[in-house]
Image (cartoon, grey):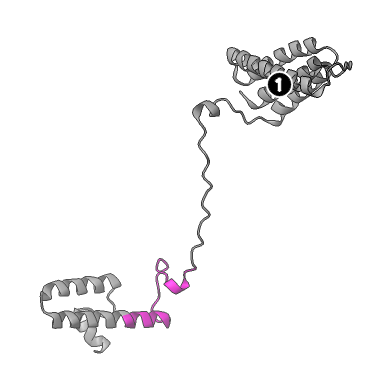
C-alpha cells in the first residue's frame, strides 16, 4: 500500500498532525464495527504513515518539535540516591538533647575543667561551684530554671555515685595520697558529667 493511498484511506493529507492521524484511525476503527478486513486495512494504513513519518524524521526532512525526543537520544536517567532514612527520635528526647554551638561547649569546658582541678584540693568547694555553674549554663539556653535544677541534681547524684565507686576501685585501700582521694576523684568525675549535661542537654 503506497503512502498516498494510506493518507487517502484515513482521509488525511501529508500535512496532518500526529494527533489528527490518531483521531482518524480511532474514528474509522469504531465506524467499521465487526469487519476484520476493514480494520486490518485501517491499521496497515496507520502503520505505514507512522513508519514513513519516522523515516522522514530520522533523515531530518521533518522538523521534530523541541518537546518531542526520540528514545535513542535520551540518556538513561541516573537513579537518584535514596536518602538515608533518619531514625525518628521520641519527642521527649528531641526536647532534651541539644546541638550545641562551639561556645556552648567551650566555655562550660573551661569552667568545669578548672573546677575538676580544684576538686583535687577542695572537693566540696569545687562541687558547690559546679552545681551553680551547671544551673547557669542550662538555664541560659532555655530559661527554664526548675528544669535546669532538676538536670543538675540528677547529674550531681550520678556523678557522685560513679565517682565514689571508681575512687574506691582505683585507689588501693589504706593508701592516702593528697591529691587522689575518693572524694577528689568523685568531684572530678562529677564536674565532667555536669559539663556533659550542661553542654549537650537543654
The quadrant in which the C terminus is found is top right
**Which residue is situated farthest in the front direction here?**
173
* Residue at x 33%, y 83% (from the top left corner): 52
Question: Which x, y percent locates residue 175?
Answer: 87, 17
Task: Please check the rendered image and state whether residue 46 is part of the magenta-colored stretch, yes or no.
Answer: no
Residue 62: within the magenta?
A: yes
Q: Count residues near mark 1 (Cα–Cα under 10 Å), then give few for <14, some for 14-19, many for 20+.
A: some
Between residues 122 and 104, which one lies in front from this camera angle?
A: 122
The residue depicted at 25 percent of the width and 72 percent of the height is 22
Please determine whether, in this image, residue 131 is positioned above or below residue 71: above
Quadrant into which the N terminus falls:
bottom left
* Residue 174, horizontal then vertical, whole percent: 86, 16
Report the residue at 77% width, 17% height from top: 187
Q: Nearer the viewer, residue 47 or 165?
A: 165
User: Residue 189 sits in which quadrant?
Assistant: top right
Q: Which residue is mark 1?
A: 162
Question: The magenta stretch spans which residues?
Answer: 51-75
Amino acid at each position: 500500500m503506497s503512502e498516498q493511498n494510506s493518507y487517502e484511506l484515513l482521509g488525511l493529507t501529508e500535512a496532518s498532525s500526529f494527533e489528527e492521524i490518531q483521531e482518524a484511525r480511532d474514528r474509522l476503527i469504531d465506524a467499521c464495527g465487526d469487519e476484520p478486513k476493514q480494520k486490518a486495512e485501517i491499521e496497515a494504513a496507520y502503520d505505514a504513515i507512522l513508519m514513513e513519518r519516522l523515516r522522514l524524521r530520522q533523515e531530518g526532512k521533518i522538523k521534530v518539535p523541541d518537546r518531542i525526543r526520540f528514545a535513542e537520544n535520551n540518556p538513561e536517567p541516573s537513579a537518584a540516591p535514596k536518602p538515608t532514612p533518619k531514625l525518628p527520635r521520641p519527642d521527649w528526647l528531641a526536647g532534651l538533647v541539644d546541638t550545641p554551638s562551639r561556645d556552648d561547649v567551650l566555655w562550660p569546658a573551661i569552667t568545669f575543667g578548672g573546677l575538676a582541678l580544684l576538686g583535687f584540693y577542695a572537693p566540696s568547694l569545687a562541687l558547690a561551684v559546679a552545681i551553680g555553674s551547671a544551673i547557669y549554663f542550662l538555664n541560659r539556653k532555655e530559661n527554664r530554671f526548675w528544669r535546669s535544677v532538676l538536670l543538675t541534681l540528677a547529674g550531681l547524684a550520678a556523678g557522685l555515685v560513679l565517682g565514689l565507686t571508681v575512687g574506691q576501685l582505683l585507689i588501693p585501700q589504706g593508701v592516702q595520697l593528697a591529691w587522689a582521694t575518693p572524694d577528689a576523684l568523685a568531684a572530678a568525675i562529677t564536674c565532667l558529667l555536669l559539663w556533659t549535661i550542661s553542654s549537650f542537654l537543654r
